[in-house]
Image (cartoon, helix red, strand yellow):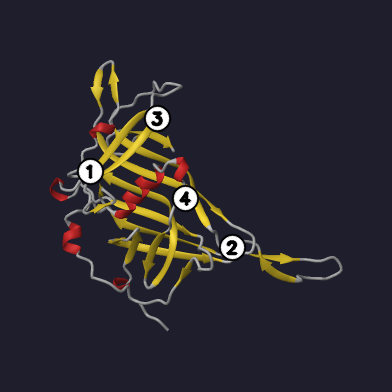
């Protein structure tokens, strides 16, 4: 029986030869094997259970939003770089390669399906990511014996200095403005999320897909501020926005580009002994 303590189960992500260990706070791995019961006339009960879909897996984890390092020409952690590259992939090159994930000795090649993060005043920023494992050719989606993750130990001192923090992050470029009276909102926080869709291609005689195609993506950002503007246009003007998250000392800003964002809703909430805050939601599609 394998025994792996939590401090021996780091999450490691590898893509195109680039590897990064993330400061994950939790990790969950699931593997499924769908079976379909078969019934026949004249026979009581089930004749048998047979596979009804390919075996697959999923993995999700939360981690501190590190902004140190450079991956594929972009500052920030490898998850943010992956998300940016996939959602902006050209339609004529939609075939994507899997990302190798290792956790507690278990590994597999998966595809990023969701990515989110939040940032607020005087708070550490945290992120979350989820992957789907389809397998490839004759390879299982997920495999491995529970064991400590081999490799170099985390350089926690270096990573800690590059954790995105609300104290050093400026999101004023996301603030709403109104013209009468002329005023610009104060931003208290923002929550960003991205979802990605894929189409695995299967052929007869093979359980796992021969390739996987990226199809589309949707993202949204919810801004908390102090201006309520109900005059949303029916055909809201699209804007290209950039969120820049900075670590302690304002170092190594990580950028998240949002193309063609449109404001789709505005709401307001108030609580006992608290200031009134408004929320605006912007969405973009790729």
Instruction: Tell which of 215 and 243 is nearer to you.
Output: 215
In the picture, the disc for residue 254 is: none
Which residue in the rendered view is the most extreme toward the left?
Answer: 249
Q: Given contact means CB atoms under 8 Å apart, are the residues at marks 3 and 1 in contact?
A: no
Q: Is residue 210 above or below residue 139?
A: above
Instruction: Tell which of 5 and 85 is nearer to you.
Output: 85
Mark 3 sits on what residue?
A: 262
Which residue in the rendered view is the most extreme toward the front?
Answer: 92
Q: Residue at x 39, y 30 (%)?
A: 263
Q: Tell which circle, 2 or 1, labels the residue nearer the N-terminal end.
A: 2
Mark 2 sits on what residue?
A: 54
Q: Tell which circle, 3 or 1, labels the residue nearer the N-terminal end.
A: 1
* Corner quadrant of residue 11: bottom left
Q: Given contact means CB atoms under 8 Å apart, are the residues at marks 2 and 1 in contact?
A: no
Mark 4 sits on what residue?
A: 95
Measured Cα–Cα span from mark 4 to mark 2:
20 Å
Q: Position of residue 167 (x, y in %)?
A: 18, 45
Query: In the picture, which quadrant includes the C terminus?
Result: top left
Mark 1 sits on what residue?
A: 121
Q: Position of residue 148 (x, y in %)?
A: 33, 75
Asked if residue 139 can be seen in this view, the reply is yes
Which residue in the rendered view is the most extreme toward the right?
Answer: 42
């Amino acid at each position: 029986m394998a025994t792996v303590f939590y401090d021996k189960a780091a999450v490691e992500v590898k893509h195109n030869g680039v590897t990064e260990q993330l400061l994950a706070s939790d990790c969950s791995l699931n593997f499924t094997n769908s079976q379909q019961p078969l019934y026949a006339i004249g026979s009581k009960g089930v004749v048998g259970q047979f596979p009804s879909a390919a075996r697959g897996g999923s993995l999700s984890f939360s981690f501190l939003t590190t902004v140190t390092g450079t991956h594929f020409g972009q500052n920030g952690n490898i998850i943010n770089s992956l998300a940016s590259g996939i959602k902006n992939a050209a339609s004529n090159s939609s075939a994507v390669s899997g990302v190798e994930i290792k956790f507690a000795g278990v590994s597999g090649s998966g595809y990023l399906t969701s990515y989110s993060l939040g940032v607020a005043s005087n708070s550490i920023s945290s992120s979350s990511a989820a992957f789907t494992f389809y397998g490839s050719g004759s390879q299982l989606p997920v495999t491995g014996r529970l064991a400590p993750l081999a490799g170099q130990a985390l350089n926690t001192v270096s990573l800690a200095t590059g954790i995105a923090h609300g104290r050093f992050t400026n999101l004023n470029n996301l603030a709403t403005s109104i013209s009468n009276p002329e005023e610009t909102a104060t931003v208290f926080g923002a929550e960003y999320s991205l979802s990605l869709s894929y189409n695995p291609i299967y052929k007869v005689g093979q359980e796992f897909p021969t390739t996987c195609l990226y199809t589309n993506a949707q993202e949204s950002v919810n801004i908390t501020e102090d201006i309520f503007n109900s005059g949303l246009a029916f055909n809201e003007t699209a804007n290209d926005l950039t969120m820049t998250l900075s670590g302690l000392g304002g170092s190594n800003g990580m950028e998240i580009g949002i193309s063609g964002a449109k404001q789709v809703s505005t709401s307001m909430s108030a609580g006992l002994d608290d200031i009134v805050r408004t929320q605006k939601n912007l969405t973009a599609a790729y």
